[in-house]
Amino acid sequence: MKVIPYIESEGCIGCGICVEVCPNGVFVMSSDKAVVMYPELCNGCGICVENCPVDVITLKWTDL
C-alpha cells in the first residue's frame, strides 16, 4: 500500500501552490487546474495538503 494525493478538481482554484511546494514534482498545471501527474513519486509528506488554500487535496491509500 502507498499514499498518493487526490485533488477534488471542482474546488481547485488553479493557484499552483501544490506544484511549487511538492518536493517530488507530483503535480502539474493543466487547463488552470492542478493535476496529479506522477502519483508514484509521492512520498506522503503532506506538504501539498498543508499548503492548499482551499483544502481540496487529500492523501489516500492505494495499491499503486
Image (cartoon, grey):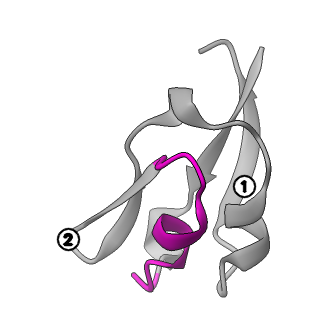
- In the rendered structure, which segment of residues is drawn in magenta? 13-26
Quarter of image, res 27: bottom left
Q: Say if 57 sits above or below 42 in the image.
A: below
Q: Which residue is mark 2?
A: 31
How far is disc 1 from disc 2 in space, using C-alphas? 21 Å
| Residue found at the far front of this picture | 23
Residue 15 colored in magenta in the image: yes
Q: Amino acid at mark 2?
A: Ser
Q: Position of residue 15 (x, y in %)?
A: 44, 86
Instruction: Determine whether the residue tagged by mark 2 lies in a helix, strand or loop.
Output: loop
Q: Say if 36 sits above or below 40 in the image.
A: below
Q: Main secondary structure of the magenta part?
A: loop
Q: Residues within 10 Å of mark 2 (few under 14, many from 20)?
A: few
Q: Residue at x 60, y 49 (%)?
A: 6
Residue 2 colored in magenta in the image: no
Q: Which residue is mark 1?
A: 58
In the drawing, what numbered circle is on residue 41?
none
Q: Say if 45 sits above or below 15 in the image.
A: above
Q: Position of residue 23 (x, y in %)?
A: 60, 54
Q: Residues within 10 Å of mark 1 (few under 14, many from 20)?
A: some
Quarter containing the N terminus: top right
